[in-house]
Image (cartoon, grey):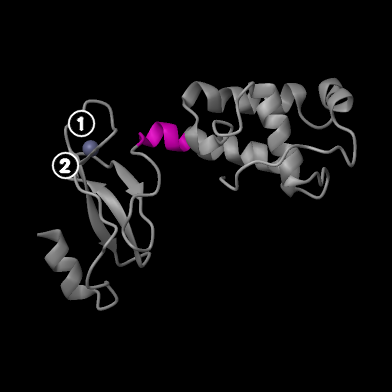
Amino acid sequence: MPMLFQKAVDPRMPEESPGEVRGLRCAEPGCEGILELRWSPRFGTWFYGCSRWPSCNGTLPAEVDGAPRGEPRTKELQGWRAKAHKVFDEIWKTGRNRVHRRTAYAWLRRVMVLPPDKAHISRMDVEQCKRVIEMVKEKGPGTEFWASWYRPGKRVKQHGSGR
Ligand SMILES: [Zn+2]
């Protein structure tokens, strides 16, 4: 089995993974597989991979102790979340705009009309991710909306430290 093989070739593989969660269903469309904790010798990390691999490539990242990071999701959704994050992060990460991260998330909650606990791209579905990308173009920095909404030094409500 793959686990034994990986163990034999990778001496860095931890002996145990206290955070492992069993029975997570693969999220890929039509897949009946279960996500199993595996060790990636290439990246030196735990991850969850579909029991139907190689016919299914479903995966989920894992924390260092083997706990799943987030909920099972399709590759498609993961791709959209990555795209939306890249576009959104430019609002506060690039030198051109330089707004505070808190301000950027306040804007995200405002344009997406979401409460603080839902205004995280890691919790959005495909349609919401597409909307984030549209909103950055239509209401982000450089737009009329932004000019009327954003004031330097504007106080915004703090919220949880999630991503
Ligand atoms: Zn699968």
Q: Is residue 94 left or right of residue 151?
A: left
The secondary element bearing badge 1 is classed as: loop
Q: Is residue 74 magenta?
A: yes
Q: Amino acid at mark 2?
A: Arg
Residue 52, disc: 2
The secondary element bearing badge 2 is classed as: loop
Which secondary structure dominates the residues rendered in magenta? helix
Which quarter of the image is occupied by the C terminus?
Answer: top right
The spot of residue 94 in percent (x, y) is 76, 48
Identify the residue at image location x=72%, y=48%.
93
Q: Earlier in the sequence, mark 1 or mark 2?
A: 1
Please state the total of marks drawn on the protein image.
2
Task: Check disc 2: other Cα within 10 Å, few if <14, some if 14-19, many if 20+.
Answer: some
Quadrant of the rendered image holding ligand 1: top left
CB under 8 Å between discs 1 and 2 = yes
Which residue occupies the foreground of this view, 114 or 38? 114
Q: Is residue 19 left or right of residue 33?
A: right
CA–CA distance in space, label 1 to label 2: 8 Å
Q: Residue reaching furthest bottom?
A: 11
Task: Check disc 1: other Cα within 10 Å, few if <14, some if 14-19, many if 20+.
Answer: some
Q: Which residues are magenta?
A: 73-79
Judge whether 60 appears above or below 9 on screen.
above
- Residue under numbered circle 1: 31
Mark 1 lies within 8 Å of ligand 1 (Cβ measured):
yes
Q: Is residue 33 magenta?
A: no
The spot of residue 111 in percent (x, y) is 69, 23
Q: Is residue 132 left or right of residue 144?
A: left
Mark 2 lies within 8 Å of ligand 1 (Cβ measured):
yes
Residue 121, disc: none
The spot of residue 132 in percent (x, y) is 62, 27
